[in-house]
Amino acid sequence: NRLHATIADINFEGILANASGVHCQTKEELAELLASPYVATAVTKSSTKEVRTGNPKPSYYEFEQGSINSMGLPNNGFDYYLDYVSQDHSQKPVILSVASLSMTEGIELLKRVQDSDFQGITEFNLSCPNVVGKPQVAYDFETTHQILTEVFKFFKKPLGVKLPPYFDFAHFDQMADILNQFPLSHINSVNSIGNGLYVDVETEASVIKPKKGFGGLGGAMILPTALANVRAFRERLNPDIKIIGTGGVTSGEEVFAHILCGADLVSVGTELQRQGIGLFEKLQHELLMIMNEKGYQSIDEFKGQLKTM
Ligand SMILES: C=Cc1c(C(=O)O)[nH]c(=O)[nH]c1=O
């Protein structure tokens, strides 16, 4: 297969996935993702100990260049997703996303994953920007180091982290130094750009209800930030830590760009929300067309090979 990847000794046929949060809250949505031949894996909505309804609506809004969301971590509860990922899914891997509302809750949930039958990949979301009163863990380097140190005392299964975007070389360096200390399966970079604000000039109002309109930005407009983060971490992380590139993918071009920057898998959020599951066939077709034009037989020939001047 020309499109393949391996994370933590788990083989993926194809390289496309949903971004956690989109089309992944229910077992039906997850099953629909896995049923697509163009989807390599499905990532669950980040799960918390308790079921959460999330923030008041409207909490999601699409505009031409992207989207803004302050969903507030609505999910059907950790048990629901652990149960789902523990079942066999047509031989396709499923990634279990776990949120960290608090250090103790995150640790407790990961302990339950460790003690469960689930043998797949877990992704620890350290970057939810929309839980009122809760900072994004991964912007606090000391706390991040502390949590990962605690986790890896007991967690022996494949574990990755979902990161927020960083915007400063000192932060790329500091975060990579921390991550390289742990046997992580992967990073997923980037989560939405936290706390943007979209204003509707006609109504003179913000467009989502929670947090006075502040929310995480996604879609086309975050592509350069997403590519910068994928590239920066690819250059800094040890090669055993793979990368799921997320952010700004609307066509095969952006999938190609993410891979060129070093992504092993590529996940799609806003555009998937817009276009539905049919998008994956379009993305895979366009990627293969680009590879044919360039004479690439396999992903491995150009992965991480971004040229600079
Ligand atoms: C898990 C919560 C997240 C949410 C949310 O549920 O509000 N939105 C995002 O853009 N990223 C998240 O990580």
Image (tube, rainbow, N blue to C red):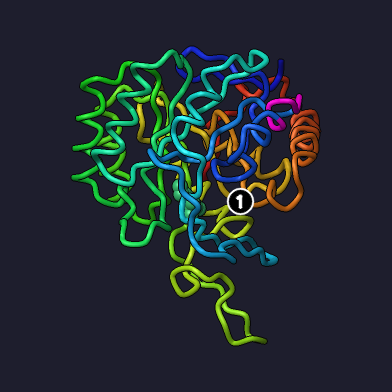
Location of residue 283 in the rendering, given as x and y in whole percent from the top left corner: 75, 38
Location of residue 247 in the rendering, given as x and y in whole percent from the top left corner: 56, 48
- In the depicted structure, whether residue 284 falls above or below residue 220: above
Which residue is identified by label 1? 248
Mark 1 burial class by Cα count in 10 Å: few <14, some 14-19, many 20+: many
Whether label 1 lies within 8 Å of ligand 1 gets the answer: no
Q: Nearer the viewer, residue 77 or 148?
A: 77
Q: Amino acid at mark 1?
A: Gly
User: What residue is shown at x 73% (from left), y 20% (from top)?
Assistant: 297
Location of residue 76 in the rendering, given as x and y in whole percent from the top left corner: 51, 40
Instruction: Determine if residue 149 is in view.
Output: yes
Identify the main secondary structure in magenta.
Answer: helix
Q: Nearer the viewer, residue 149 or 70?
A: 70
Q: Nearer the viewer, residue 193 or 21?
A: 21
Range of the magenta residues?
32-37
- In the depicted structure, whether residue 215 falls above or below residue 154: below
